[in-house]
Amino acid sequence: MNWMDIILDVLVGMLLLYSITLLLAYICIGLYSIVAVREYINKNSFSDYRILAVSPEAPSMSILAPAYNEGTTVVENARSLLSIHYNNLEVIIINDGSKDNCLQKLIDNFDLQKVDFFYNEQIPTKKVRGVYKSKNKVYHKLVVVDKENGGKADALNVGINISSNDYIVCIDVDCILEQDALLKLAKPFLETTKKRVIATGGVVRIANGCEIEDGRLIKVNLAKGFLPRMQTLEYIRAFLLGRMAWSRINGLLLISGAFGAFDKEIAINCGGYNHKTVGEDMELVVRMRRYMEEQKVPYRVTFIPDPLCWTEAPSSFKILGRQRNRWTRGTIETLLFHKKMFFNPNYGLIGMLSYPYWFFFEFLAPIIEFFGFITFLFLALFGETDWKNFFYLLSFILSFGFLYSVFAILMEVITYNQYKNPKDIFKLILTALLEPFIFHPFVVWSAIEGNVDFLQKKSAWGEMTRQGFSAKQHGTETTVAAAGPVIIADKNIEDIRPAGLLDKWLEATQTFAALSVSWLVIALLFALFEVIYLGFLYEYPEDISKMIPAAFRNAALFWLKYNIVIYAVYICTYQISKTVARALFSGTIIFLGIVQILLIEFFTESLRPLGADLYGYSIKDIEHIIGTSGKINIIKIVNLIFAVVVTTGIMIGFPERIKLHSYLAALLPIASLALILLGTSSFRLPPFKSEFANIITLNKSDFFLSETFRHFFSADTQNEDVDK
């Protein structure tokens, strides 16, 4: 055994240990969540929230809602927040330097006026330009702050400085809260006496597809769109299972920025939200926990499974990719800021379990999965894969993931059962089946892009284009980037130019697909030419109807099989120059067309039963055939001119007419890869009874691409004998 084998065995062993540990972690999370949810439901079955709602002893809450260019939905969402049933409440909307009419709409609809206000800057922030309150006593709970743009974290810090209550509730202004949301969120702060509760989070659900009127949730429906439905399943799994389990052992590191309550005193002592990270919600929770551990003060971070907050999920891959990119960068930044806690027993459970879990299974998991796939691809190409065990493991992983998702759906049904239509549950189960093949790979790629952007020191928050909860505009969406400096309002999302590694890859894939389809047209034309050309030289067999489909099939298989090879070269070249990539692709296809014509010429003159299919030859075979194809005559010249004109004409003009959606185009290399991994069953042309049939019939054995690579690129490989 050489050193390469040893390294490979060590890597495989480490990956196996990693995978087993991750699966065991998921099993433990699932079991813990059952206990945690059952305890919560039993304990709260005796609670009367009506008493808490009117009690003067209820914790005083300040809702902080940062708004940037929210003019389309800000009034509706402000009314939703003001309608929440809670006594000791103030609603603070922070206008973070909006460039639209966000502030003016608030002034007009709530009869606001600028007031003198003592601003106690306990946390440094951007300049506050004014504080507004309503002349109408109905809106006495509303406070509107106008400030210079500084991002979401800076806006929340202004809200902390302005707030007058003991606890702050940080939400996204586009969220819809249940009427009893604050009552349930306040309860943990009252009932825990031995340990100080420093933060509490609640379940966030997807509002896409739900009926919402005047800022209130009227009816819960499962989202009709594919992506929102995928995220609905993801949120059920993450909140109802993951966070409930971590909350039970007091190891929770994250409370969603969309909805969470914090002890204001501890938040101020920790310095408020960090504006140097795009993951300010997670970073604040970790910093507050770190502060309490260093102060040696008993504390808890709790989570409740009630669906309290509804938010709109991204409905396009572009916006979803930006969101997951930002989440990844936020996770990396938080882990780096607090790397001192990594396996540090001085920080208790958070240092020995929570932080390592996030490092190994949240931060590293997408990276390991991505490079594992690349490694597997190379092993498959060079025939080093144990296919039997591979399919066993693949089936096990897919089955485990599906069952875990179904378990989360079951937990939803037996607890809060928000989706009462049985068809919705069936759709969620179907979503769980599709997730590993569509949604999960995209999320992994977005995480990789986030890692690359982090290394390139990109700190943009990114636009979050949403349609809003009110009447949707046809073909348009409205930007509500809560903390970004860029506004792209009322634009069709397709007009926004691609940005980032993912979008550039999709753009390259789209152009490749158009060129590749043009190549398929050429391959089919040449297959048809071969049959017709031979028909003029030899007598047609009786079953000519079977010859053309067989020729088309072989041409299509050859096209599909080598798409992945040319695709890899094209994508790499595309990153350097689009023009060079296209010229290289077109030149390659023109060259292959000329070689194909020469093969047909030799085949017809030599009467050797090799066939004229390019994939059946090694480099030596092609050199021999081209060199011995006979003397030059007028027919050969015409055929060569025909090959050059046809291939050049199609490759120049045809791709411009093909407009494939980028994600549809991506199916082409995926199909090629699937053919590589699974192999093809047969390359045999249908048997014919004539002399002509004996010449053109192929009889090749099954093979995977690893063998094809060696056969096609190896100069030493000889053709197999073929029975006539």
Image (spheres, rainbow, N blue to C red):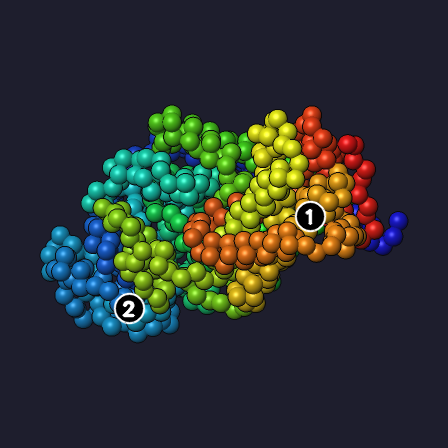
Q: Secondary structure at mark 2?
A: loop
Q: In the image, is 586 to the left or to the right of 189?
A: right
Q: Hey, which residue is sitting farthest front in the picture?
A: 634
Residue at horizontal 68%, vertical 54%? 633
The picture places residue 273, in percent across and down from the top left corner, at 41, 63
- Residue type at mark 2 is Gly
The picture places residue 227, in percent across and down from the top left corner, at 42, 43
Vertical arrangement, residue 268 with respect to residue 550, above or below: below
Give the mark nearest the N terminus, 2 or 1: 2
Q: Identify the image quadrant of residue 154.
A: bottom left
Q: Which residue is mark 2?
A: 97
In front here: 64 or 436? 436
Residue at horizontal 81%, vertical 48%? 717
Q: Hey, which residue is sitting farthest bottom in the picture?
A: 127
Q: Identify the image quadrant of residue 131.
A: bottom left
Q: Can see residue 45?
A: no
Q: Secondary structure at mark 1?
A: helix
The picture places residue 379, in percent across and down from the top left corner, at 72, 47
Instruction: Judge the density around disc 2: few (<14), some (14-19), many (≥20) Cα neighbours within 10 Å.
Output: many
* Mark pair 2, 1: CA separation: 73 Å
- Residue type at mark 1 is Glu
Q: Which residue is mark 1?
A: 601
Q: Can see residue 462?
A: yes
Query: For the image shown, how many numbered marks are present on the structure?
Result: 2
The picture places residue 231, in percent across and down from the top left corner, at 43, 43
